[in-house]
Amino acid sequence: MNFCIKDELDVNDYESVLNFLDSLNFYCIEQHPDWNNKIEGYSHIYFLGAEENSKLACFANIILSNGPFKMASINFGPAFSNFDMLKKSIHFLHDYFSSRKFIFFSIQLGINISNQTQLLEYDINYNFKVKYNFKPGNLWSSIYIDLTRPENEILKSFSNGHRRRIKNSFSKTGLTVKIKNDSTYLESFTRLYIKMCEMKNLPYSEEDVIHSFKNINSLLYENDKGFIVYIFQKEHLVGGLIIIYQGNSARVYKGATDPERKDIPISHVGIFEALKLCKKNNCLILDLWGYNHFANKGDPVYSINQFKKGFSESFTFFPKRMNFVLKPITYNIYLFLRFCKKQFKNPKMKR
């Protein structure tokens, strides 16, 4: 079994990775070879794992830190063909970064908890020291809608409020939905997303949003990896929803609604129309992607949780993020300097 780390994929590597991902029933889009660079703007390297017959069986986008302290991480990966390959890949990556003076390495697996993930964790913890943090940034849970049922049955499973809003949306609100690759729609959706961020005081970079949305649109339509739902009231765009395919499942990646139009059920309509197309395209689930079990009443995230629960109460849980402190002394120095930097930026006022 051969393992390989590269900082660039040639044409053959790239095609091999795409074919490998297409062969999987499920993987997270963060493992698409274009994702880190074109969508997220991360510094990255690629990891390739090949079996003895040279058939690709594992792939990961690896994010590298900037600055003097060498750290690496994988978000929702690696993508893999079998658990034995995944286990050996994690062993390889741990040893690889340990031998190259990295001080920290972390992996958030992009798979649902199962008996196999439990066995994997036993093996990794037996061989290495793993640190787990029981907090939102190190725990991932989500809610999904089961698309294997008839459409009418799916609608009936929604909360009374959601079901009523969807049924009344077209006759009483004049909402229409368009799903197509259209540059004018995309530009309007991008402006709407920026408007929403401004009015809700959400952090954003206009340049990054424009760059990201343009490249996501290309990724979806050039590779048949999803679609964008555009929601209109008459001629005005009032919402949008980005849907990404991940093997035989679909995922709500990002959305926006006009913050001045809370009187109409924009998101309800967007999700319902999206699930119908996903079902038509043989997706088994629509993952609403992200449920924060730590959110309290009054927190905006709590309201988002309640909105998602109106569509389903079927939860998924991913394994806790595995954190490997490879150079404890240096890593503690890094944490101390990071703490001092935060204190310098936000000094406490003395009376």
Image (spheres, rainbow, N blue to C red):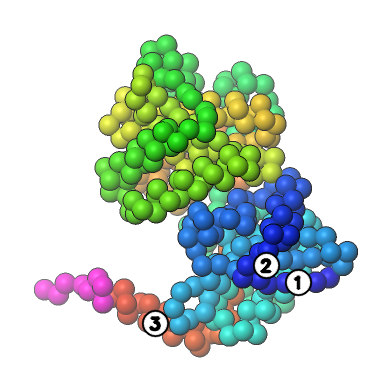
Q: Secondary structure at mark 2?
A: strand
Mark 2 and mark 3 residues within 8 Å of each other at the beta carbon: no
**Front tag of 2 and 3:** 2
Question: What kind of residue is marked 2?
Answer: Phe
**Residue 284 drawn at (x, y percent):** 68, 35
Disc 3: CA contacts within 10 A as few (<14), some (14-19) or many (>=20): few
Q: Quadrant of residue 147?
A: top right
Q: Earlier in the sequence, mark 1 or mark 3?
A: 1
Marking on residue 336: 3
Q: Residue at x 77, y 55 (%)?
A: 81
**Residues under numbered marks 1 and 3 in contact, where contact means CB atoms less than 8 Å apart:** no
> Which residue carries the number 1 mark?
3
Work out which quarter of the rendered image holds the C terminus and state it: bottom left
Q: Report the residue at 39% width, 54% height from top.
A: 208
Label 2–label 1 contact, CB within 8 A? yes
Across and down, in percent, residue 171 comes to: 42, 11
Q: Which residues are magenta?
A: 344-351
